[in-house]
Image (spheres, rainbow, N blue to C red):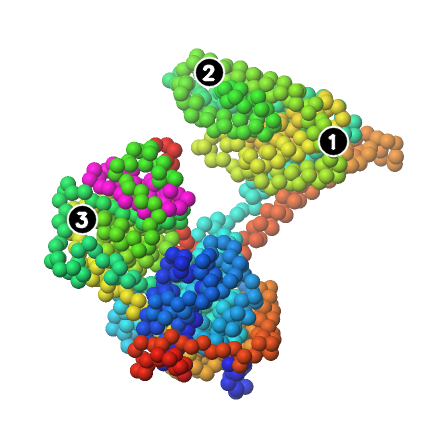
Amino acid sequence: MPYNIAMVSDFFFPQPGGVESHMYQLSTKLIDRGHKVIVITHAYEGRTGVRYLTNGLKVYHVPFLIIYRASTFPTVFSFLPIFRNIVIREEIEIVHGHGSLSSFCIEAILHARTMGIRTVFTDHSLFGFADAGSILTNKLLKFALSDVDHVICVSHTCKENTVLRASLDPLMVSVIPNAVVAENFRPLSHPAYSDTAILPQHLGPHDTITIVVISRLFYNKGTDLLVAAIPRILASHPNVRFIIAGSGPKAIDLEQMLERNVLQDRVEMLGPVRHEEVRDVMVRGHIYLHPSLTEAFGTVIVEAASCGLYVVCTQVGGIPEVLPAHMTVFAKPEEDDLVAATGRAIAALRANKVRTEKFHDQVKMMYSWTDVAERTERVYDGISGALSEADFYGYEAADAASWSATRGRAGVQSFALIDRLKRYYGCGIWAGKLFCLCVVIDYLLFLMLEFWAPRDAIDIARSWPKKLREEKVAGDGSSFPK
Amino acid sequence: MVPNQAPPIPATITTMTTTTTTKVTKQQRPDLTRSSTVPNLIPQLASNRTLLAPEDAIYQGSPPRKQSPAVKKLQHGLRMTNGLNGDAPAPLQSGRQKSRHRSRSRMRKVTWKKLLWVKQSYPDNYTDQATFLEHLQRNPRLQPYDFWPLVADSTVIVQHVCSVVIFIVCFIGIVQDRISPVGVVGWGSVATFLGWVLWDWWLGQDDLFKHPNPVQLLAPQYNSTVSSASSTSNLSMHNFGSTGSTPNLGAHHHNPSSLVARHSHSASASSIQSATSQMTDQSPRLIPIFPAGSTSSLSHRTSIRLSTAKSALLIYFTLLGLSPILKSLTRSTSSDSIWAMSFLLFTINIFFFDYKTPEASSGNKNIPASLSTNAALMASTVLASRLPSTGQVFSLTLFSIEVFGLFPVFRRYAKQRTWQGHVTLTGLLIVGASGGVGLCMGHGGDGEGMLDFPWKAGLTGVVVGVISTCLAMGVCSWWLIGLQKYKNEIHGPWDPARPIIRRQWDDY
């Protein structure tokens, strides 16, 4: 059954990034599967109002104050009026928030539950538990996720992290990885895209091997490791070149390293590249080096493998889950080990032990957005009751009866205010009471809005004519969903 | 779509609602089959098995009085996947295996793998008991404290607080015309000089130690006499310092003078500090340049001594020149603001002071954090600007450089060299500080009361101060040990890795 879904996050195009493209690709594929999807984000410079993207994806750019790196100012209630308006206008049934640092997403989940709408949250990042910033963020996340219907994480490590951070029932958390659009990351010559026959590349002992690094040059992307490792790799392997793309505060360190060691002729710094150009950079190399220190999923190494590159990466976060062993060489996040792993990768390539020309098809089989959309759809089915509880949570119905009472009728969290308050109350001695207060105020605001801006005064938006599902093409646009 | 249109739930179910998923921490639970057995099960779960399970994340070691709501939720998750029906709390190993058997036999042939690239026949929200959270580490770097070492370590803090107090007492004495400023700075300088002599001697020992010659087969014996001698000299020096109620200052002017000369033209107090810090950073490199041949090392050390004397003279004269300016620096500011400001700055000094013990390998050359030193020197500058005459201003500023710039370095080194010396120094500082405070606050020798004698206030201060300091050290240590049980650090693969880089790339 088709749903009306609202994706909510602070992070969306035109800003580039992993969350943004995830939301876009997922929305597109869900639309292909017959759902109606809208995106709610804040206004970017030059992007205000309502926009339509390809495939009829409608984007609401809500004007909001931005404080830090495209995150909006966290006000607990101020998003409610316009959010309610949009939700009623678009007849939304499921609100799907993305990104735990997005206050938009957290607010939307709260308001959606107040309005009696199912919510899903997707977590894209890993957080520690040690520093003050993480503690605050984790408390906020706990607040938001106390009353969420289901959570999606991009890797199993991310799931463990989120379960701990927000004290969730592990069964409420699904792991659905990111994906890549394989067509956009194809190797230089591939039979599926050109007529040339497949030629296994044979590298002689003296052919130049190019190592590609594409990452934002930040501390947590491991640029320090890179700076330490490059001179040693280049010193021990004469026929090796580097291509480094990306910008960031650590770029200076890299450049200083190049100047000190006079490596300008062997290391090419490209500066920032757009996401569309990433493939063109990748196909110039043989090895992709990814020295990151923390990574929830690491889409970029999948992209690199899809381009037919042999991947050398640090064994951190969710990275070990992402690619099979024959595509990767893992290193510990240490300078020595990274150098050694790169050496192993170079030796394996020179010995022609790695069939990189097969990587593309293999990656294409592993990750696709269609698959992601299907699995997400199953989550939607589960929370809205289309799937039986036993099917969704995977245990016997008898077992379920004893605890699912809280979840109301269909294996989903009850909307009754008292039940919601109980869930929030458990968040902490003080925080629990504060959260309850927030929820009560939110509910009162919602009631006031029902009075001041009644539902029947809000117009219902026409939905974009669907390509496949409706046979009678809605040329006049008169066919509303339902 | 009014939200609370939840279906009418039978009364029994609502009570279950309250017990099971709600996050209310403590509740009277009706006699339900599952949830009532849960709490008994958990400690057992935690104790007898090797693998971690989700509930370990929150349960173990968190404060016992409150059971985290997350535990309950996680338990639910666990039990669900296990398929255990909440019956008797079975010993875990068998329960776990049984449950895995069951789930496997239910529909799965293959074992679940923690991989994203394989299509698995498990649902997306499947939680594998054997591997979920297996890399979780709790309190990995926990080292339990012992009482007496903790008390011993707290002496460093006590020393610093006492030296700040002594400085303030001296200021009050000068302001109230009870102590002559020249006396303060004179005794201070004498103590500084003695400290420097001691320091210089210790350095000489270090050099002998670092470059043993064939001649020095006698070295161990020599060394033992030295240590005893040094402790006695230490003692005598401290007596000296405390009678003048001034802390003694270990100068560390053993450094080459070039840097001082470079910096001294702008010899505000803070820049002196920064100059010394630069020098000290460099000195470890300089020492090995001169091999241990006795004549060459002597000449090297002599030149160092000469340069030290030169820089001391430079500081002296610069301060002398600056004093008239400092005197009128804050004339337009009211005294209240000055007291508040200097209080704040001294607080900053105490809180940001670098109390950590340097490793023996890194040598004695670490300079305390500059924020703290700068705050103290600024505080003493604004305090000095309250004083009426140039001589007083000069004395107080010079004294502050000795107390806040040089004395910490000496204390740090002294602690490394002789433990007895360190303890004695601490005791003397406590006595000095508390006696000074007593003298400032009380009034003795004015003929009032029966038991009046000239040093009554001071003696009372000493007694009260020493007792309260010892109590505070003990109580704080005990408190810190008590707080350890609340420590609950969680580490896992999601933490940013710490890159291990062999060489800093300044070294290339």
Q: Give how far across and how far down residue A2 sits, in percent.
A: 37, 79
How crowded pointer 2 is (Cα within 10 Å; few <14, some 14-19, many 20+) is rated as: some
Q: Mark 2: which secondary structure?
A: helix
Q: Give how far across and how far down residue B401 sits, in percent.
A: 62, 27
Identified at 62% across, 45% down, the residue is B474
> Which segment did they paint magenta?
A222-251
Q: In this view, does B84 lie above or below A264?
A: below
How crowded pointer 1 is (Cα within 10 Å; few <14, some 14-19, many 20+) is rated as: few
Residue in front for this viewpoint, B35 or A9: A9
Quick check: A290 left or right of A239?
A: right
Q: Is residue A228 above or below residue A74?
A: above
Q: In this view, does A127 lie above or below A49?
A: above
Identified at 25% across, 73% down, the residue is B109
Q: Distance between the residues labelled 3 and 2?
A: 58 Å
Q: Mark 1 points at which residue?
A: B331
Q: Name the residue under label 2.
A: B300
Q: Mark 3: which secondary structure?
A: helix
Name the subunit of mark 1: B
Residue B20 appears in the rendering: no
Identified at 17% across, 62% down, the residue is A192
Both labels 3 and 2 in a single chain: no
Q: Mark 3 points at which residue?
A: A349
Name the subunit of mark 3: A
Quadrant including the C terminus of chain A: bottom left
Q: Give how far across and how far down residue B406 sits, in percent.
A: 58, 27
> Residue A465 appears in which quarter of the rendering?
bottom left
Quick check: A448 left or right of A239?
A: right
